[in-house]
């Protein structure tokens, strides 16, 4: 499975500042660093390989530098972008049902935790959560978010891990508690179906037997609603998409004019996904260091897919990756879904 995306609100891919890690009040022994941040060389390699492919493409994980994360925060505040707000509205109801139905003592593991905004309804409602183990690739951002959370939830043990959770990961330290995974935001939609299956299997291995996973999944719906969500009137999604070209300009010695490209997003009904592209306005060459890359007029770079899952689609995906659906919630108008999955393999 490829190394994709940490597209969580507020996440950045800036290098880990070990000073920052040392200054924070989260005990340093609680912070585990499992993988290095994305290397500059990896970015070079991925950009050149992606732009030399017959369908040019770039990984959506490269959206999330500091400006990209800032644009994503703005997207979440837009009226048109329903997934963020809809899930946030659904979460208190989900949390109170879980508080009633889930008996036990839990270690809550959040994948791609970012700013830790969505975990609070769970912490507020479920008394059995004693340990919180967020995982994110952006170490500095994660540790400072954990520090703030620790102030608010003083009796909670907060133990962050700096890692790329899409890769196999040995997560120790459940301390005898039952693992409860949390993967909100429909980030699963940014994986291809094969990657999504690999991810769910990986999470099952990380959390182990007797674990649960609470996951947010965007649903199939009217293409008009989807189109609006990814083509907002203020043009923030366009800026978010085009920012990947600015990022290339910052990293390469390049002749690339961002104004030669435009944002294009549409719902591909047969694939069940939003596709985001950057379309060349004219036939031209760009130069990245010594490499010349040609674009025809109208040729695109595919920058992101955002898959949408009907309940049946998601049931099939869960079953084939060893999870069983324990509970399901649908937001009003079937706009967004959440599922509590139980590890079905013993
Ligand atoms: C993070 N991810 C779930 C968002 C999505 O909807 O696929 C990223 C995004 N792309 C454009 N707008 C938001």
Image (cartoon, helix red, strand yellow):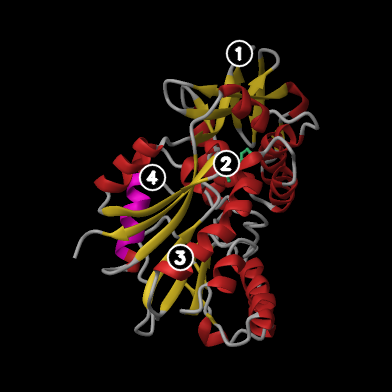
Main SS category, magenta section: helix
Q: Position of residue 162 (x, y in %)?
A: 52, 69
- Measured in 3D between alpha carbons, the distance from the residue under mark 2 to the one under mark 3, in whole angstroms, is 19 Å
Say the numbered circle drawn on residue 332: 2
Instruction: Place residue 151 in its image quadrant.
Output: bottom right
Q: Is residue 277 visible?
A: no
Of badges 3 and 4, nearer the viewer stands: 3
The range drawn in magenta is: 197-205
Please name the residue shown 47% across and 70% down the image. 99
Q: In the rendered structure, are the residues bearing label 4 and label 2 in contact, judged by CB atoms less than 8 Å apart?
A: no
Instruction: Place residue 14 in its image quadrant.
Output: bottom right
State the residue lying farthest toward the right.
234
Of callouts 1 and 3, the N-terminal one: 3
Of callouts 4 and 2, the N-terminal one: 4
Q: Quadrant of ligand 1?
A: top right
Of badges 1 and 3, nearer the viewer stands: 3
- Measured in 3D between alpha carbons, the distance from the residue under mark 1 to the one under mark 2, in whole angstroms, is 44 Å
Say the numbered circle drawn on residue 217: none
Of callouts 1 and 4, the N-terminal one: 4
The residue tagged 4 is 196
Q: Nearer the viewer, residue 330 or 203?
A: 330
- Measured in 3D between alpha carbons, the distance from the residue under mark 1 to the one under mark 3, in whole angstroms, is 53 Å
Q: Is residue 90 visible?
A: yes
The residue tagged 1 is 296
Of badges 1 and 4, nearer the viewer stands: 4
Q: Nearer the viewer, residue 202 or 215?
A: 215
- Measured in 3D between alpha carbons, the distance from the residue under mark 4 to the one under mark 2, in whole angstroms, is 25 Å
Determine whether 74 is above or below 193 in the image: below
Please name the residue shown 38% across and 78% down the image. 104
The residue tagged 3 is 98
Q: Secondary structure at mark 4?
A: helix
- Measured in 3D between alpha carbons, the distance from the residue under mark 3 to the one under mark 4, in whole angstroms, is 25 Å
């Amino acid at each position: 499975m490829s190394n994709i995306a940490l597209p969580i609100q507020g996440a950045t891919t800036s290098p880990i500042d070990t000073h920052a890690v040392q200054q924070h009040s989260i005990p340093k022994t609680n912070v585990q660093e499992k993988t290095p941040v994305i290397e500059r060389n990896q970015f070079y390699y991925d950009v050149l390989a992606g732009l030399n492919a017959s369908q040019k493409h770039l990984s959506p994980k490269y959206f999330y530098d500091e400006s990209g994360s800032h644009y994503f925060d703005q997207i979440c505040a837009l009226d048109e972008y329903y997934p963020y707000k809809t899930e946030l509205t659904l979460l208190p109801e989900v949390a109170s049902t879980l508080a009633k139905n889930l008996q036990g003592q839990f270690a809550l593991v959040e994948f791609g935790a970012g700013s830790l905004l969505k975990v609070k309804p769970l912490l507020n409602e479920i008394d059995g959560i004693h340990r919180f183990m967020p995982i994110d690739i952006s170490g500095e951002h994660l540790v400072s978010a954990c520090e703030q959370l620790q102030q608010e939830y003083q009796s909670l043990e907060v133990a962050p891990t700096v890692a790329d959770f899409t890769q196999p990961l040995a997560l120790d330290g459940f301390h005898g508690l039952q693992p409860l995974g949390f993967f909100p935001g429909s980030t699963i939609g940014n994986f291809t179906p094969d990657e999504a299956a690999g991810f769910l299997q990986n999470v099952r291995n990380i959390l182990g037997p007797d674990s649960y996973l609470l996951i947010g999944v965007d649903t199939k719906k009217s293409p008009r609603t989807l189109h609006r969500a990814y083509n907002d009137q203020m043009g923030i999604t366009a800026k978010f998409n085009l920012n990947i070209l600015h990022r290339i300009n910052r990293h390469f010695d390049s002749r690339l004019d961002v104004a030669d490209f435009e944002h294009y997003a549409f719902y591909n009904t047969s694939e069940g996904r939003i596709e985001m592209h950057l379309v060349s306005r004219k036939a031209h060459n760009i130069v990245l260091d010594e490499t010349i890359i040609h674009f025809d007029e109208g040729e695109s770079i595919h920058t992101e897919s955002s898959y949408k899952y009907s309940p049946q689609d998601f049931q099939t995906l869960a079953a084939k990756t060893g999870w069983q659906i324990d509970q399901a919630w649908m937001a009003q108008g079937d706009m967004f879904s959440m599922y509590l999955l139980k590890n079905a393999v013993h």
